[in-house]
Amino acid sequence: MPGDNGVAHGASKFKHKVWRRQRSTTEGENSRCADSATLDNCRQNLRALFSQIEQEFEKLYSENISLQDRVNLLSLRLEQCGSAERPDNYDQIDGGLQKNAKKSGSQISQKIKSTYKTSTSRFTSTFKSTSQPYCGQLVRTFADHTDGVWEVSVSHQGHRVLGTASADYTARIWCIESGAVLLQYYGHHGSVNSIRFHPTNDLVLTASGDNTAHIWKASIPTSLLTSSELKNKQSSDEEVEDEKAVDVSNTHFIHAPLQTILGHSNVVVAADWLVKGDRVISGSWDGSALVSDVETGVTVDTLSGHENALTNVVCHSSQPFALTSSKDSSVRLWDIRDSSVQVNALVGHSSSVTSAVFAATNRIVSSSDDRTVKCWDMRNMSAPYIVIRCDSAVNRLSVSNTGTIAVPQDNRHIRLYDLNGARLGRLPRSNHVGHTRMVSSTAWNDDIGGCCNLFTAGFEKRVLGWNVTVKTSDSKDKTKSNN
């Protein structure tokens, strides 16, 4: 058919007009190089953009914290101004004063108040405090980690040293007097989440995100401590201004542990020494705590009962007791003896419990993401006897031998309370003094004299050493807390 022939003929003509160009090998290589250069430029641009975003976020976060502090201060002033005395039998309505002839409402209110006064728990709110005095001075800055610091711990063997556990996969031992790094431990393959010193020997226990806990030797020659202390010639103010000037000339490096604690199937968040130092307890996100022998590393017992991941483990300094805190909003007190293991549950928080520690005689103090600190009496653990309400989530706290609670918070504050819930003050925090990110841990230096008696770890990669002076509770409060 003509139509078919025409189409075929047209197609034939079209084929003759097609020109195909073959690329040479050189052109292909140039194209690939151009594509690679374009990808590198894109990556660099993305990194620059992400860096700008992070800087803007940090700036906004700092401004938000500053505004929040101003709001809190104005709120306190408003409460003070609004608490002026006025006649009890008058109510202000529509700009005028009307006499309140009926007293039944106030009588009912008094009955309700009396009922609540007999409650088993006494609440202490930090928002209604009329003063927040500073009670500490920044003395030393310990800055050598390359990522956030999860925990700080102080040695009680007579050496003036402290230990830090960081998300940069390392643990470090520092000289308190000079701020110099004495030892660095590189044995873990994950974030180091806790660090604890042996009660009598030169051993250190660390827990890590690599699902293990390590025991390693941290013997520090006296000559090294002396030389580090002699190099401490700068004043505290000069050190704060030059935080990056850390002496690492005498640093020793450790790459392998003496013993590895295995058995967990998830991140090990904390590990601590039992009272005799021959066994350790490790807590994990797998919901269990393992009791292990130090010499062999073999699991002796498994402490189970929590319904969610563990967040911390703390052992008593003189008794076979241990505390495990968990994301299931509870704390468990374990009585670990050779023949049996007994457990008591402390239930009262409404969110993840971040830590629980032993305090004065028969006292336990717990902290939580629910913005509270709770004090418990071990003789009656049905409910806390004190609830301290904070303005931000609370992390791993510590209690001094004199009963002062150092409370580290997500909002960069460190506040101080006694075991009766009374606020004693807070540590300074500004652009040049204090932490600039979340405060993750605190540790008191009770046994050793010196320049610092409190250490705080922050997620801006630093640990700060403070000289804290607080007014202790009067004798009446002390008697009450010990009864």
Image (cartoon, rainbow, N blue to C red):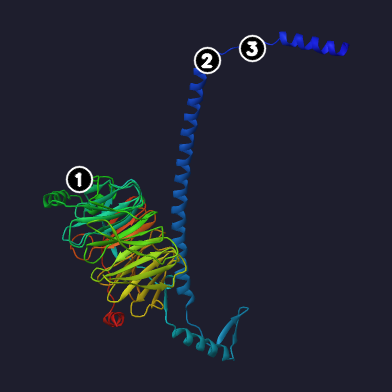
Q: Outermost residue toward the right?
A: 1
Foreground tag (3 vs 1): 3
Side (left or right) of 399 relative to 97 = left
To which residue does mark 1 refer? 252
What amino acid does circle 3 point to? Arg
Report helix, strand or loop for mark 2.
Answer: helix
Residue drawn at the location 18% of the way across and 57% of the way down: 160
Number of dots carrying numbers: 3
Task: Tell me which amino acid carries mark 2.
Answer: Glu
Question: Where residue 97 appears, x then y in whole percent?
Answer: 59, 84
Measuring from the top left, give residue 78's x and y in whole percent: 48, 71
Which quadrant of the structure image shows residue 376? bottom left
Q: Earlier in the sequence, mark 3 or mark 2?
A: 3
Quote the CA–CA distance across marks 2 and 1: 55 Å
Q: What crowding class fits label 3: few (fewer than 14 Cα within 10 Å), some (14-19), or many (20 or more)?
A: few
Give the residue number, with chain letter if any, for mark 2: 27
Query: Residue under circle 3?
Result: 20
